[in-house]
Image: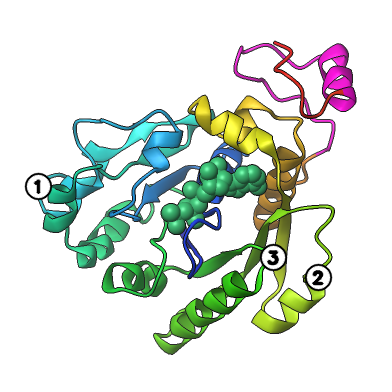
Amino acid sequence: MTTVFTIASGKGGTGKTTVTANLGSMLAYHKKRTYIIDADMGMANLGLILGLDGMPVTLHDVLAGEASVKEAAYPGPFGVTVVPSGLSLEGFKNSDPERLRDVMSELIGECDILIIDAPAGINHDGIVPLAIADEVILVVNPDLSSIVDALKTKMLTEFIGGKVRGAIINRVTSVDDTITKDQIENMLSVPIIGMIPEDVNVRRASANRMPVVAKYPTSEASRAFRRISSSLTGVHYPEDDKMENNTGKKEGFIDRLARALFPGGKDVN
Ligand SMILES: Nc1ncnc2c1ncn2[C@@H]1O[C@H](COP(=O)(O)OP(=O)(O)OP(=O)(O)O)[C@@H](O)[C@H]1O
């Protein structure tokens, strides 16, 4: 059975693409056959942060009716399958978001989990991903405008008959005492699935065209992504699990100690 998750927000820039890339990679690591699809077709950057931009066939071609989704699918970290969007405005113009339904039908049964990175806002191209998901996951930042926009997305999802699974609070800082987790939970009236800290390693990993869970597996953000993927799959993930990093080398005690002592420091590899 395939479960379709749509990662949505309301406000732009809250971290949908980051969540899609990292959650998808972690679920693949858990041996779930996982597809991640960049339906943020106007502002595509899933391929960019995974080193899969400039691919010959993209979701644009699929939604223009010129290719099948499997032709636009590429292997990503830990075996996740990535369907990037193209970067051209022409391709965006020719894409019909309604065709996402066909993409979904094509992949049902072919994978365990399908994650759709939705565009920000509540335009037509943003509504289809909300409508076709089994469960929508909201990504919010701990600020009022992000929460209010997520609330609008939640209401829209329910209005069109969709279901919101919960919210992920991203970019939480230790000095942030303005809005608490409980307040966000109350405002949105959905469970909080997890909290991801503000972590410079997220941007450092993107600059290296990798998800943080693969590039900096012991970072705070990676730990948070592992907890969230465990809670979605029910697979227990020991905190001291040894994941292979980008060099293919197992993280040893010295690496972990160095990271613990110098969390914001240089890559020790
Ligand atoms: N937890 C985090 N810590 C530090 N930086 C982060 C974190 N999450 C996301 N970012 C950074 O914030 C920026 C926006 O993230 P991202 O592109 O994932 O957002 P988005 O919601 O997909 O944006 P858009 O609405 O434009 O599609 C990126 O530079 C990303 O690296």
Q: Which mark is residue 180?
A: 2
* Quadrant in the rendering for residue 238: top right
Q: Report, in whole angstroms, how far the alpha carbon at label 3 lies from the one at label 2.
A: 8 Å
Q: Residues within 10 Å of mark 1 (few under 14, many from 20)?
A: few
Q: In the structure shown, which secondary structural element does the residue marked by tag 3 occupy?
A: loop
Q: Which mark is residue 5?
A: none
Q: Position of residue 71 (x, y in %)?
A: 22, 37
Q: Amino acid at mark 3?
A: Pro
Q: Amino acid at mark 1?
A: Glu
Q: Residues within 10 Å of mark 2 (few under 14, many from 20)?
A: few
Seen in the picture, residue 43 relative to 208 is either above or below; the reply is: below
- Assign the magenta stretch its main secondary structure: loop
Q: Nearer the viewer, residue 20 or 106?
A: 20
Q: Is residue 189 visible?
A: no
Q: Nearer the viewer, residue 266 or 38?
A: 266
Q: Residue beneath label 1, please?
A: 66
* Quadrant in the rendering for residue 220: top right
Q: In the structure shown, which secondary structural element does the residue marked by tag 1 occupy?
A: loop
Q: Is residue 54 left or right of residue 264?
A: left
Over which residues does the magenta segment extend? 238-261
Q: Residue beneath label 3, please?
A: 142
